[in-house]
Image: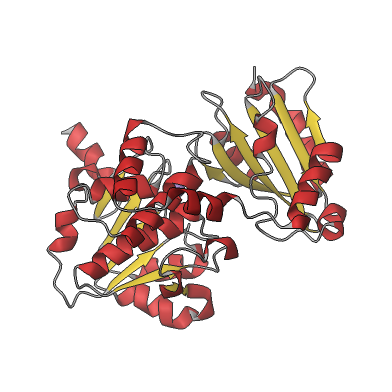
Amino acid sequence: MMAAKLNKAIGLNSALKAEDFKSLGKNTSLVLLCHQRPDGDALGSLLGLGLWLRSLGLSAHLLCPDAYPKNLSFLPQSSELAILEYQPTHWESMIEGADLVVLLDHSRRDRGGASAAKALQKRTGPVWMIDHHPEPESFDKSLHRISASSTCELVCELLHKEKLTTEMATALMCGLLTDTGGFKHAVRSETFQAAARLLDSGVNYPELSTQIFDTNSLQSLKLTGFALKDRLQQHPDLPLAWMVLNHKDVLDYKIESGDTEGLVNYTLSIEGNKMGLLFQEKDPGITRISFRSKGDCVVNQMAERFFSGGGHKNAAGGRYEGTAEEAEAFFLSIISEQFA
Ligand SMILES: [Mn+2]
């Protein structure tokens, strides 16, 4: 009885299957929604699942809360993605009134931004969810596994018996590649099984990997050089390195979102390190912090407890009200106990 109650509370008694989508009537109005500041996995799962639904003859709206990074606009059919914040009233009423809403790559109703959260709250119809982030809310149906590398891997699981076109497979491979940093972390055997199947569905892997990873601008590469030379610090006693980009750095290097993508990973590439951080003060007095870690070194709890953030065990984000240097000093004051 207890177990059944618990399962109901976390939505495990209603595992989402491909058949659930296939049994929808052709006139069903569907909205697929990813999380704010969408990344490769958010867009990949949105397009991968969305294109498959359309191949069934269903008309699915593929919705991002806000604009996606330019370097992902190569994804097949990305012009089909709608941006909620460009037409908030229209999309809020769509989220509220659609026959079915599916959340992708997030499992808490506030992760799609305030506008989507408001509409989801008013909504009385079903909401389904496919995601791999910890601590999901309850949904009418869901496919949720923290152990999965990516939401795209879960979409592959959902569609394991379905035929995938090259476009669907390319979108899904994008999520596998980006959420694992090029198959470097968070992988399990199912990840490679999914990747093998996507390759067999026609993905041009060298081209895709170039489009995803070889996208530095000259400016962002020079910023990387500066950050490595002048801003990278190693803790004297702990397996930990970090970089601080203050507001002056942001202005000097004209840092835009995307320019610092991947920068934090250098902190973990130092032999023996288990944790790495990047502090960035994009707006004066507000510092965003990226946390990365390896193995059993967990960062999402710290991000949540001290930096109003969250995320995965080994990759999280947060913020601090203060300059980058103040955020750094606060972090250093609390960090010893994390390694105690
Ligand atoms: Mn993801």
Q: Can you see residue 137?
A: no
Query: Where residue 318 appears, x then y in whole percent?
Result: 63, 46
Q: How is the image coloured?
A: secondary structure
Query: Where residue 174 appears, x then y in whole percent?
Result: 45, 52
Query: Where residue 17 appears, x then y in whole percent?
Result: 19, 51
- Position of residue 247 in the picture relative to residue 216 (left or right): right
Of 250 and 118, nearer the camera is 250
Query: Where residue 74 appears, x then y in whole percent?
Result: 50, 64
- Position of residue 195 in the picture relative to residue 29 (left or right): right
Of 269 and 101, nearer the camera is 269
Residue sitting at x 28%, y 60%: 165
Of 232 and 332, nearer the camera is 232
Of 142 and 257, nearer the camera is 257
Q: What count of labels does the image hold?
A: 0
Which quarter of the image is occupied by the C terminus? top right
Residue sitting at x 69%, y 21%: 239
Determine whether 183 is above or below 283 in the image. above
- Position of residue 76 in the picture relative to residue 327 (left or right): left
Residue sitting at x 45%, y 56%: 42
Residue sitting at x 76%, y 17%: 237
Which quarter of the image is occupied by the N terminus? top left
Q: Can you see residue 328?
A: yes
